[in-house]
Amino acid sequence: MRICFFLIFSLLCSVAFTQSEFYTKKYTPQQLQEDFQTYKEVFEELHPSLHWYSSEEELDQMMEEVERQLKQPLTKFQFFNLLAPITAKINCGHTGTTAGATTPNRIPLEFRYTQDQLYLYYDYKTKEKSGKVVESINGHSVEEMRSKISNLQGTDGFIETPKSLFFNNSLIFSYRYHLVYPETDNYQILFEDGTQIDRKSISEDSLKLLRSAIFPPQELIVSEIQPTKKTAILTINTFGKGILEAANIKYKKYIKTFFKKIKKADVEHLIIDLRQNSGGEDNYASYVYRFLTDQSFRYYKSMETNAIPFDKSVTSKVYLPTEVRNAFLRKLFIKKKGDRFFVRATPRTKGLRKQRPKRNRFQGELYFLISGKSYSASAELTAFTQAHRPNTIFIGQETGGAIQGNTSAVSAYLNLPNTRIGSYIPLVRYTMNIPNPKRGRGVEPDYSIEPTIGGVLAGKDEELEFALELIQRE
């Protein structure tokens, strides 16, 4: 059921304007007010979880404050920095507002944020690893950057772990840095020990080329059996159907074969690593759980949406995926409660149907490696497992996705008529079939393990090492 349109959306939002226009071209109060009114109307009409975590009063107060600032001309840069925090306040990681075209400037450095500190990891100029603690960049403290930049993109509920992840990818960091701070060709990095370095920016293409040499593509699925330790490790880095198919990976066959192998090998301990898995097909996630239980189960309690947006006064303002435009979803949403529609169980929406355990299911000791990147379908799997499979051990950091569910599936895309600032709005709320979930929080680990900078520099996998040591102790 869940479909990703973020690539399409990025193309839609790549409108033609120069970076100097982004920071200097001003829009009239009338243009800004028209855009803001469109923004409000579309979100209120389409988003099914507008007040799941933030009250109507909170959002209204933010909107009123923005409206008061639209009585004078503003640049797109200024207007974006008023809109994006409102979108972020919805506290939905699948919802966002984007500025469209990005700055050509990229910082030729790699950083790592861990244990509440920012470290310089790799310098593309000197081709050396560092490990020095960063104090500031161009005079902006690490805490200031973290606060301002993370304020532009919401996370599920009240989860903090994803809010520093942008530091750990120089391409993403450079892009987000210039949404908050005007572009510059020079970067001054001040370290905690008082020393500093200065670096000139490079192009996005140049940085991509340099990064590819240092960070080769990850394997999408990796498995290993350690017969002498009666232990197996299954790493699933994506549930993305299109991504897996493009790599010629037959996902369900791979999973089925893996569990058959560990059954034959008499494996007693299984580690499932989802630390890099940001989600994808929900049926792929629930398929794994069918090999982890001896009970039939229903994955979702409900899927629901606002009244399906076929009203042309709304749909004329947004881009809608084919599934919505050709009325496909109309066939799925049959139960109505007030202004809400509920999805019926079909082969397309397996999560609402009772699913049976698989034959070669694993019934030994189960461990999950999790992080703030464990999101969407990945977070759903960990949440459901924690609720329904007793004694499962979780190691790492709190997942990026909320236990109670998320709002995702197909999305509508809004480009504001004047500034062309864009927003993506998921249309379906998924509520997990989990009793008494902790509101707005992800799965919290039984053992909180965060990488040390020493371990990162040495290429160690400290969470996995901890899991293997824990198994040896038992």
Image (spheres, rainbow, N blue to C red):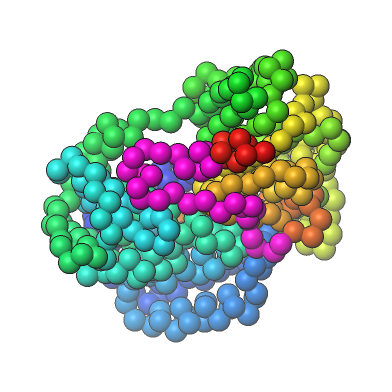
Picture coordinates of residue 243 (x, y %)?
A: 51, 29
The answer to whether residue 41 is above or below residue 343 is below
Q: Residue at left 80%, top 34%? A: 293
Q: Residue at x 20, y 64 (%)?
A: 193
Residue 451 painted magenta:
yes
Q: Quadrant of the C terminus?
A: top right
Report x, y in % for residue 385: 73, 43
Specify whether 351 is left or right of 216.
right
- On the image, the x and y values in percent for residue 285 come to 67, 36
337 magenta-colored: no
Point out the image quarter for the N terminus: top right
Is any atom of residue 264 visible in this view?
Answer: yes
> Which residues are the magenta region?
438-466
Task: Using the rendered view, name the quadrant where residue 151 is placed.
Answer: bottom left
Closer to the camera in the image, 385 or 178? 385
Residue 259 sits above or below residue 352 on the image: above
Q: Is residue 449 above or below residue 85?
A: above
Residue 41, position as x, y percentages in the image: 58, 67
- Residue 25 can be seen, yes or no: no
| Left/right of residue 15 with respect to residue 243 in the rendered view | left
Is residue 115 or residue 256 the one in the foreground? Answer: 115
Give the residue drawn at x 54%, y 59%: 155
Q: Residue at x 24, y 41 (%)?
A: 207
Q: Nearer the viewer, residue 188 or 82?
A: 188
Q: Is residue 144 left or right of residue 25?
A: right
State how many labels appear.
0
Of residues 190 and 103, the one nearer the viewer is 190
Q: Does 352 appear above or below 71?
A: above
